[in-house]
Amino acid sequence: MKNSLAYSLLATAALGLLASTATSHDTPEQDDSPMHGYAYGNPALEASPVSLEQLRELQTSLLFGEDDVAALRMSLEVLRPQVDDILDVWYGFVGSTPHLLAYFSDPATGEPDGDYLAAVRKRFGAWVLDTAKAEYDEAWLAWQHEIGLRHHTTKKNLTDGGRGPSIVHFSHMVALTIPVTTTLKPFLEKGGHTPEEVERMHQAWIKSVLLQTILWSHPYIKDGEF
Amino acid sequence: MKNSLAYSLLATAALGLLASTATSHDTPEQDDSPMHGYAYGNPALEASPVSLEQLRELQTSLLFGEDDVAALRMSLEVLRPQVDDILDVWYGFVGSTPHLLAYFSDPATGEPDGDYLAAVRKRFGAWVLDTAKAEYDEAWLAWQHEIGLRHHTTKKNLTDGGRGPSIVHFSHMVALTIPVTTTLKPFLEKGGHTPEEVERMHQAWIKSVLLQTILWSHPYIKDGEF
């Protein structure tokens, strides 16, 4: 066990390798080409098995309220110009953590699949902005369901023809809530907001990412136990 | 959706009802009688299906390091004299949230089972202190596994003969990481520590509770997908 934030920042520095598999201008607002595999709002998506009413109950269990929606939306313009730097930190952490990099690597050779990493990175950038937009309707639920299926054996590797293993295990998918939100905090601090506002944005991000990883877990859970 | 912290504090005030089902002196250090159903360290417990090596990997994914262990242990003496007040807040939140109170209520009558609530409350107090002690070995893993089984259909209601439904659903069990740790923060602030130390304790608590709810999820997850 290591001091984790230092570890993750160190990892970033160490990881020219992975970060360089993606160009530096592929965040959605800087790239006009359609983003392969991005399907938020696509009416062809399968409806979520989770109803809006269940979502509201889950939000209540998470103490997720209108104040959190406002804090997430406040974070949108803070994060938008920093998306690439945020992804460098996240990819640095994943790339320097062998059991996580394995999810993006060919199980036969152990070799990271650079094309797959780069394709996911584009959508990861869009996900940052979508999370900050904080719209919780049926289109959003259907997209969360699709994201879950793409981590699960149901659809893993299908979108990009990736050569990774056939699943991202449940436990690590949910655990990543923490590095994603912990490493986000320094970026939230760069928007000129008060420490109280930064704290509110940070807590809202923790809740929103946990909400999403819970929803992504649906295909992993035995029938009737979600 | 409501402003959640205010909501939870309000709930506490509103909930004489449930809080009063437990006596005010049943935290472990004030009660010499053995605690029914408490089995941490009991060698008769089934071993966890999660190995120590898997636990270390999961801790890495959670950015959980030695600094977090130290922060949790720092919280032990801060929280010990406040356990009953903490439980009042948590029970207040559960008791005022119908879909959560349902897990402690007879599905036939909708009536909360006061004996069951009181029995769980005792062990919940011990759990606060155990979480702050932060020992991560095989005995701890076996106890987490047992706690998971008791939320799952496998063993729900068996320990106390409770009259609740036969499962605590996965999604709410993991979601409760947030109210448990959010409402803890004001208690962490009462130990005379610096704001930085309070923040470190709070973040360590979020990681530790999420780690535990992930482990408790094991019986809910399809074979090989944990």
Image (cartoon, coloured by chain):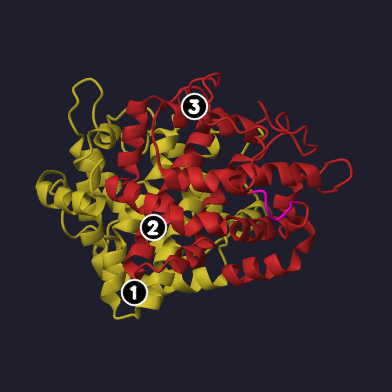
Chain colours: A red, B yellow
- Quadrant assignment, res B102: top left
Q: Are marks 1 and 2 in contact (CB under 8 Å)?
A: no
Q: Residues within 10 Å of mark 1 (few under 14, many from 20)?
A: some
A130 or B22, nearer to the observer: A130
Mark 3 or mark 1, which is nearer to you?
Answer: 3
Q: Is A91 contained in the magenta span?
A: no
**Start-end of magenta stretch:** A22-26
Q: Is A24 contained in the magenta span?
A: yes
B184 or A213, nearer to the observer: A213
Q: Looking at the image, which residue is at 68% across and 65% down?
A: A12
Let me know if residue A186 appears in the view.
yes
Q: Calculate the distance from the C-alpha at mark 2 to the C-alpha at mark 3.
A: 25 Å
Question: Which quarter shows the C terminus of chain A?
Answer: top left
Tell me the subunit letter for badge 1.
B
Tell me the subunit letter for badge 2.
A
Q: Is residue A181 toward the left or the right of residue A1 in the image?
A: left
Q: Calculate the distance from the C-alpha at mark 3 to the C-alpha at mark 1.
A: 46 Å
Q: Are marks 1 and 2 on the same chain?
A: no
| Residue indicated by mark 1 | B77
Amino acid under disc 3: Ala
Q: Residues within 10 Å of mark 3 (few under 14, many from 20)?
A: many
| Residue indicated by mark 3 | A142
Secondary element type, mark 3 = helix
Q: Is residue B93 above or below residue B200?
A: above
Residue B125 at what x, y percent from top left? 31, 57
Residue A183 at what x, y percent from top left? 54, 62
Q: Is residue A153 toward the left or the right of residue B117 in the image?
A: right
Q: Which mark is residue A201?
A: 2
Q: Is residue B118 above or below residue B130?
A: above
Amino acid under disc 1: Glu
Q: Which mark is residue A45?
A: none
Q: Looking at the image, which residue is at 85% across and 47% down?
A: A110
